[in-house]
Amino acid sequence: MKGDPDLDPKGLILEAYRIEGITAAQCRSIFLDWALSLPPQTEAARAIRALLEIYRPGAPDHPMTAVLTEGLGSMGAPRRRGGWRSRPRN
């Protein structure tokens, strides 16, 4: 096991910080894979905050730090999708 079993079970975030020259787009892709691999009992916002506490001090300008910060900001309440009126049903 590469990473913390609750925060980074596959070690994806850890590895992202180790990759020289990684781009923000690559970090977003890794972030999505990370989010999908979290154990069901792990609250994503809590895990992101913990990961930022671990990695931000040593890499404040790293693209993954920016992606994690963005991810934390977008962890608000789910919004309804679709238009203001429902489509007629057949």
Image (spheres, rainbow, N blue to C red):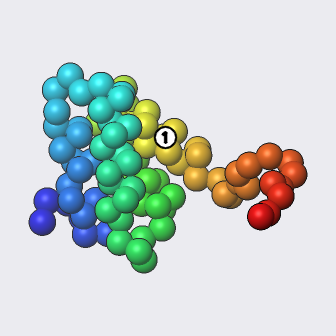
Q: Position of residue 37 (x, y in %)?
A: 32, 62
**Image point 23% across, 38% down: which residue?**
17
Density class for disc 1 (Cα within 10 Å; few <14, some 14-19, many ≥20) is some
Q: In which quadrant will I find the N terminus?
A: bottom left
Can I make out residue 54 in this image?
Answer: no
Q: Nearer the viewer, residue 58 or 13?
A: 13
Can I make out residue 16 in this image?
Answer: yes
Q: Position of residue 20 (x, y in %)?
A: 16, 26
Q: Nearer the viewer, residue 38 or 48?
A: 38
Q: In which quadrant will I find the C terminus?
A: bottom right
**Image point 14% across, 59% down: which residue?**
2
- Picture quadrant where residue 61 is located: top left
Residue type (three-letter) at the residue carrying disc 1: Thr
Q: Position of residue 55 (x, y in %)?
A: 32, 44
Horizontal relation, residue 63 to residue 19: left or right: right
Q: Residue furthest bottom?
A: 41
Q: Mark 1 highlights which residue?
A: 69
